[in-house]
Image (cartoon, rainbow, N blue to C red):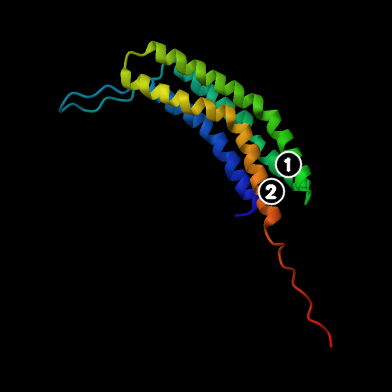
């Protein structure tokens, strides 16, 4: 896998994971009732207005940060072989998007707090508490993690032996 592919995969994972984490938290806040023995399984409960609004916010967040991955690749590519410039330019791109991650983490935190407060289901409360303890810090730390992944990829690229260029056979 080349540098661009690895970088894209790392950024895409974070971008896609954030709304998925929010969706997991949303579904944990509305556990499905258990069907009576012999009864047909009930349909999934409808999302509350707060859950629907948060899901829309998660999707909007994903749309806002989606361009980040291609911008990082463009910055790194434009820097050529200058790893320091590549890192600085990639960091500048990531810094522009950091507020999106922090804002969404704050919204997820507030959403989970309200869902926990409104729930009486101890299993749902435990699930949301766990989601809050993992997803919110991951979102807040995403920009630093992406920067570290860029640095790691740049270091690996610099350490890799230069591609062998075909040599011309010696002339006699």
- Please tell me how crowded label 1 is: few (under 14), some (14-19), or many (20+) other residues with Cα within 10 Å: many
What residue lies at 84% left-to-right and 88% top-to-bottom? 172
Label placed on residue 15:
none
Residue 94 lies left or right of residue 130; in this view the side is right
Q: Do tag 2 and tag 1 residues touch (Cβ < 8 Å)? A: yes
Observer-nearest of 109 and 78: 109
How far is disc 2 from disc 1 in space, using C-alphas?
8 Å
- Where residue 118 sits: x, y (%)? 39, 11
Q: Which of marks 2 and 1 is nearer the N terminus?
A: 1
Observer-nearest of 91 and 57: 91
- Where residue 103 sits: x, y (%)? 60, 21
Q: Please say whether residue 159 is visible from this viewpoint.
A: yes
Residue 6 lies left or right of residue 44; in this view the side is right
What residue lies at 75% left-to-right and 38% top-to-bottom? 88
The image quadrant of residue 2 is bottom right
- Which residue is situated farthest in the left direction here? 38
Q: Name the residue under label 1.
A: 87
- Please tell me how crowded label 2 is: few (under 14), some (14-19), or many (20+) other residues with Cα within 10 Å: many
The image quadrant of residue 149 is top right
Q: Name the residue under label 2.
A: 154
Quadrant, the N terminus? bottom right
Which SS class for mark 1? Answer: helix
- Which residue is situated farthest in the bottom direction here? 172
- Where residue 80 sits: x, y (%)? 78, 50
What residue lies at 68% left-to-right and 56% top-to-bottom? 159
Residue 168 versus residue 49 in the image, above or below: below
Which SS class for mark 2? Answer: helix
Q: Please say whether residue 30 is visible from this viewpoint.
A: no
What residue lies at 55% left-to-right and 39% top-to-bottom? 13
Residue 44 lies left or right of residue 16; in this view the side is left
Residue 41 versus residue 147 in the image, above or below: above
Residue 128 versus residue 76 in the image, above or below: above
């Amino acid at each position: 896998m080349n540098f661009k592919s690895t970088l894209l995969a790392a950024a895409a994972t974070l971008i896609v994971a954030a709304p998925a984490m929010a969706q997991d938290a949303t579904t944990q806040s509305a556990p499905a009732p258990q069907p009576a023995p012999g009864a047909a399984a009930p349909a999934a409960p409808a999302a509350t207005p707060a859950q629907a609004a948060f899901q829309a916010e998660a999707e909007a967040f994903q749309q806002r940060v989606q361009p980040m991955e291609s911008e990082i690749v463009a910055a790194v590519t434009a820097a050529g072989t200058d790893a320091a410039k590549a890192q600085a330019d990639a960091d500048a791109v990531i810094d522009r998007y950091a507020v999106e991650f922090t804002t969404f983490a704050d919204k997820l935190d507030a959403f989970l707090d309200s869902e926990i407060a409104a729930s009486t289901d101890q299993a749902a409360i435990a699930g949301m508490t766990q989601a809050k303890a993992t997803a919110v810090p991951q979102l807040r730390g995403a920009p630093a993690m992406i920067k570290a992944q860029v640095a790691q990829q740049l270091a690996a690229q610099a350490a890799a032996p230069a591609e062998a260029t075909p040599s011309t056979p010696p002339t006699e």
